[in-house]
Image: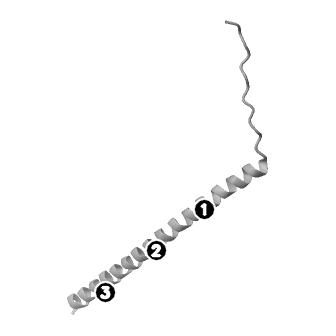
Amino acid sequence: MTSTRRRRVLRPVASTSTVVSAQLSRWRGRLAEEQQALSRWMTRLKRAFHSLEKHQQRVARLERQIRQVEET
């Protein structure tokens, strides 16, 4: 067996503008997905926060009522 050189695979060089635009396109897609996810979580968070506020107000009102009755 004779030793022959390995052939190099010649691939066309991608232009940097194509690479950058493809990367920007992927990033924009990911950004849109993350913005949608953030919007869904913010909706849930607002709902939970307002529910928490209502419970705190109820507890404070009940504590006030109990204190008023005990003082009289």
Instruction: Tell which circle, 1 or 3, labels the residue nearer the N-terminal end.
Output: 1
Between discs 2 and 1, the one toward the N terminus: 1
Tag 1 and tag 3, C-beta contact below 8 Å: no
Name the residue located 76 percent from the left edge and 44 percent from the top edge: 14
- Do labels 2 and 3 touch, CB within 8 Å? no
Local packing at callout 1 (Cα closer than 10 Å; few below 14, some 14-19, many 20+) is few
Which of pointers 2 and 3 indicates the residue nearer the eye? 2
Q: Quadrant of residue 57?
A: bottom left
Badge 2 vs badge 1, beta-carbon distance below 8 Å: no
Q: Residue at x 23, y 86 (%)?
A: 66
Residue 33 percent coordinates (x, y): 55, 63
Classed neighbour count for the residue bearing mark 2: other residues with Cα under 10 Å, few (<14), some (14–19), many (≥20)? few
Disc with the residue nearer the chain's start (2 vs 3): 2
Tell me: 63 left or right of 31. left
Element type where label 1 sits in the image: helix
Q: Nearer the viewer, residue 65 or 19?
A: 19
Q: Distance between the residues labelled 2 and 1?
A: 18 Å
Label 2 to label 3, Cα distance in Å?
27 Å
- The mark lying in front, picked from 2 and 1, is 1
Could you tell me residue 31's position as x and y percent? 60, 62
Give the residue pinned by disc 2: 43
In the picture, the quarter occupied by the N terminus is top right
Marks 1 and 3: which is nearer the front? Answer: 1
> x, y percentage for residue 42?
48, 71
**Pointer 3 local density, CA inside 10 Å: few below 14, some 14–19, many at least 20:** few
Give the labeled residue for mark 1: 31
Q: In this view, does 64 lie above or below 4?
A: below
Q: Can you tell which quarter of the image residue 26 is in?
A: bottom right
What amino acid type should be assigned to the residue bearing mark 3? Arg
Residue 60, numbered circle: none
Q: Which labelled disc corresponds to residue 61?
A: 3
